[in-house]
Image (tube, grey):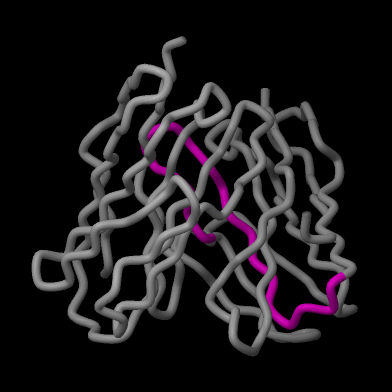
């Protein structure tokens, strides 16, 4: 398994509260991604990072922000959680080189917003 | 925008038999990559097989093989000698710039 740790694995929160999910990698990969997984939609890209302090928006970025202050950590923040953000969140990593187009995934975080 | 379509929400196969999962995609790019990921109940996303669009030869990984038809924009996954451990959600994915995923096919393996 790629060295990717997501925390927490499960979280229940209330509407309007801030939430931060953490992705930690030990692979020293350059690229990191946050996806959400919902029934009928597969995985959809929220934000990604191509280096420390370098981030960009994905397909479904509204209501989310990210930060990457170190190579190994990529944080996803919901500033004010809403019920529509109830989902399973996956972090992924990839790097340069021959396998640059392969993304390796963490185990996911199940977030419930009540 | 690129889209990926998996037209089979659910499939089932008898143990030791062969099953084919379908995937089509829409793109105007000529250089891209295609993937099949497996997601068992543990929720972990596991790469099963990948195909580079510039390669005409279909990728194979043990019991897993693909039928890549570039002109038809089709990328199906064949699982031979199905095993109980193959039961999972299978996602087709396309990558040019972003990675785009299909909605998934749930595969059941019957003993």
Residue at 80% across, 50% down: A21
Compared with A22, A93 (above or below) is below
Residue at 45% across, 67% down: B99
In this view, which residue lies farthest toward the top?
Answer: B111
Q: Quadrant of the C terminus of chain A?
A: top right
Residue at 77% across, 78% down: A29
Q: Looking at the picture, how far across and down is residue A44, in whole percent? A: 47, 54
Q: Looking at the picture, how far across and down is residue A108, in whole percent? A: 71, 43
Choose between B3 and B13: the one closer to the eye.
Answer: B13
Q: For residue A42, which quarter of the picture? A: top left
Magenta run includes residue A44? yes
Choose between A104 and A70: the one closer to the eye.
Answer: A104
Q: B65 left or right of A56? A: left
Compared with B104, A91 (above or below) is below
Q: For residue B96, which quarter of the picture? A: bottom left
Q: Looking at the picture, how far across and down is residue B63, in whole percent? A: 45, 45
Q: A68 left or right of B80? A: right
Compared with A75, B39 (above or below) is above
Choose between A109 and A16: the one closer to the eye.
Answer: A109
Residue at 38% across, 69% down: B51
Q: A69 left or right of B25? A: right
In this view, which residue lies farthest toward the left?
Answer: B72
Magenta run includes residue B102? no
In this view, which residue lies farthest toward the bottom?
Answer: A97
Q: Quadrant of the N terminus of chain A?
A: bottom right
Q: Which residues are magenta?
A: A27-45
Choose between B4 and A41: the one closer to the eye.
Answer: B4
Compared with B68, B14 (above or below) is above
Q: Looking at the picture, how far across and down is residue A55, in whole percent? A: 66, 80
């Amino acid at each position: 398994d790629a060295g990717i740790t997501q925390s927490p694995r499960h979280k229940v929160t209330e509407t309007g509260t801030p939430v931060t999910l953490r992705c930690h990698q030990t692979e020293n990969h350059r690229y990191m991604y946050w996806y959400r997984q919902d029934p009928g939609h597969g995985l959809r890209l929220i934000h990604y990072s191509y280096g420390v302090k370098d981030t960009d928006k994905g397909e479904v970025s509204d209501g989310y922000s990210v930060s990457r202050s170190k190579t190994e950590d990529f944080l996803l923040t919901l500033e004010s959680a809403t019920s529509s953000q109830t989902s399973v969140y996956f972090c992924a990593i990839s790097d340069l080189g021959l396998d640059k187009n392969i993304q390796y995934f963490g185990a996911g975080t199940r977030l419930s917003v009540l | 925008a690129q889209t990926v379509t998996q037209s089979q929400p659910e499939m089932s196969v008898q143990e030791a038999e062969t099953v084919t999962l379908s995937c089509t995609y829409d793109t105007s790019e000529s250089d891209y990559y295609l993937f099949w990921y497996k997601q068992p109940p543990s929720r972990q996303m596991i790469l099963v097989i990948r195909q580079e669009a510039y390669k005409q030869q279909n990728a194979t990984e043990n019991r897993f093989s693909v039928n890549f038809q570039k002109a038809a924009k089709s990328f199906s996954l064949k699982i031979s000698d199905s095993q109980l451990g193959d039961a999972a959600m299978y996602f087709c994915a396309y990558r040019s710039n972003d990675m785009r995923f299909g909605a998934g096919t749930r595969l059941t393996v019957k003993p």
